[in-house]
Amino acid sequence: MSTQILLLASEEAGLPIIPTLTEVIVGLVAFSLLFIVMKSKVVPRFEKAFADRTDAIQGGMERAEQAQAEAAAALKSYQDQLSDARGEAQKLREEARAQGAAIIEEMRTKAQEEANRITAAARASIEAERQQAVTSLMQEVGTIATNLASKIVGEALDDQVRQSRVVDRFLADLEGSK
Amino acid sequence: MNASILLASGGFVSPGSHDFVFKPVFGTSILFTKPVFQAILAAILVAVFFLISSKKAAVVPSRAQFFGESVYSFVKKDLGEDIIGHEFMKFVPFLFTLFTFIIVNNIFGIVPFMQFPTMSRFGFPVALMIFTYVIYHYVGIRKHGLGKYLKDIAFVPGVPKWIYVILTPLEIATYFIIRPFTLAIRLFANMFAGHLLLLVFIMGGDYMLHNSMVLKIMSPLSFGFGIGLTFFEFFIECLQAYIFTLLTALYIAGAIADEH
């Protein structure tokens, strides 16, 4: 006990700049053990976390880029489809217009033909009626004229031959005066 | 012990180197003193904290993991990569251990009920200095070979021949004596002086509080200074941990550099 007190007393008197061997050894050992823990466990774990994080961020960015590329491709395809559809619609309109024009032309031709036909038929029928009228008129005129003539002349024109001759002469005069 | 001296003499005993000597916590062995326990506790605390905070190593970090990673990244980037260069990764575990171990031991200086910076016992900075010393010479020799490494140190290229008469002993002294000595002393002396400063104001305040009325009124001023200086000490404690690690990184960088 007394030596211990002496030791303490001597330490107290000693310069603080003189290192105690115990403390150096404890410092060396404690630090070494801590170093082993840090090197074998802590540093690799932190490095792993950093690496994982880098991967996660880079992976995320790559995925985002891919998604962007996909979206751009989709947009392009839609635009292509849209322009195709526009072209198609344009073409259809042109065709419809052409078809419409053709139909109108056809109808017009048909109508013209029909009109011509009707006109021709009317003309023919008028001609026929006229012919008929002329014929019947001729006969009627002949009868009337004969009756008149017989009344005037007082002479029966019963004789068919004679009557016919008179009528022909009359008609010839009639035509000649026309 | 101080209290007994104080009581016995009745006068103010100014804090001094005797305040840095501790009786054994139990038994008579000088192995079990407060600073020794603190050094061991610091190693355990640092190891446990970083083991827990790095346990999951998740992509999305928890708060503890984020803090642990921040400290690790700071050492890796600012002290490793920026100073040592492309070979830095080998030294990151050492620098990281050094920084965390020193800063925790330093901050013990202001932790209530501990209030003693472990590094103000010269043995601990010496132990850390031994690691730095061995490592930077070792990597230098392994990289350049013993002959070339010593020649690079002793004969700095690009100076007139006669300068070597002065420069060679200086360079040798720098690399083998001055650097390790100043490295350990810087940390030790900062912690020692800081602790002494806090003792002066806080023990002074305590002394005044138990004295005449005039001194009693003055004592809060002393305590106030002590509290203010505690914040200042916190800054110094972090700074010194940084400087020790920074200089270690610089020495390693110098040893493995292609040109000295």
Image: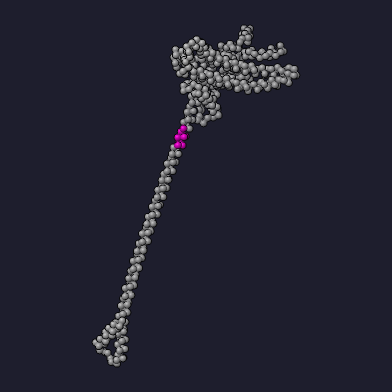
The furthest residue to the left = A161
Q: Main secondary structure of the magenta part?
A: helix
Region in magenta: A58-65
The percent position of residue B198, horizontal first and vertical second, equals 65, 18
In the picture, which quadrant includes the N terminus of chain B? top right
Q: Nearer the viewer, residue B189 or A149?
A: A149
Point out the residue furthest to the bottom here. Answer: A154
Q: How many marks?
A: 0
Judge from the rendering whether residue B197 lies leftward or rightward of residue B97; answer left or right: right
Q: Is residue B90 above or below residue A88?
A: above
| Residue at figure coordinates x 54%, y 29% from the top left | B62
Residue B121 screen position, x and y as percent: 59, 14
Q: Is residue A98 above or below residue A29?
A: below
Per the image, is B69 magenta?
A: no
Q: Quadrant of residue B127?
A: top right
**Observer-nearest of B236 and B117:** B236
Residue B66 appearing in the image: yes
Q: What colour scheme governs how the chains and residues are painted in the rendered image of this protein?
A: one colour
Identified at 69% across, 12% down, the residue is: B5
Q: Horizontally, is A163 left or right of B257 in the view?
A: left
The image quarter in which residue A100 lies: bottom left
Q: Determine whether, in the image, residue B129 is placed left or right of residue A81.
A: right
Q: Can you say whether A101 is above or below B194 in the image?
A: below
Would residue A36 be seen by someone viewing this image from the given angle? no
Residue at the image point whose x is 35% and y is 68% from the top? A115
Residue at image point 46% right, 18% down = B259
Question: In the image, is A128 to the left or to the right of A75?
Answer: left
Q: List x then y, in percent, for residue B126.
A: 55, 14
Q: Position of residue B66 (x, y in %)?
A: 54, 28
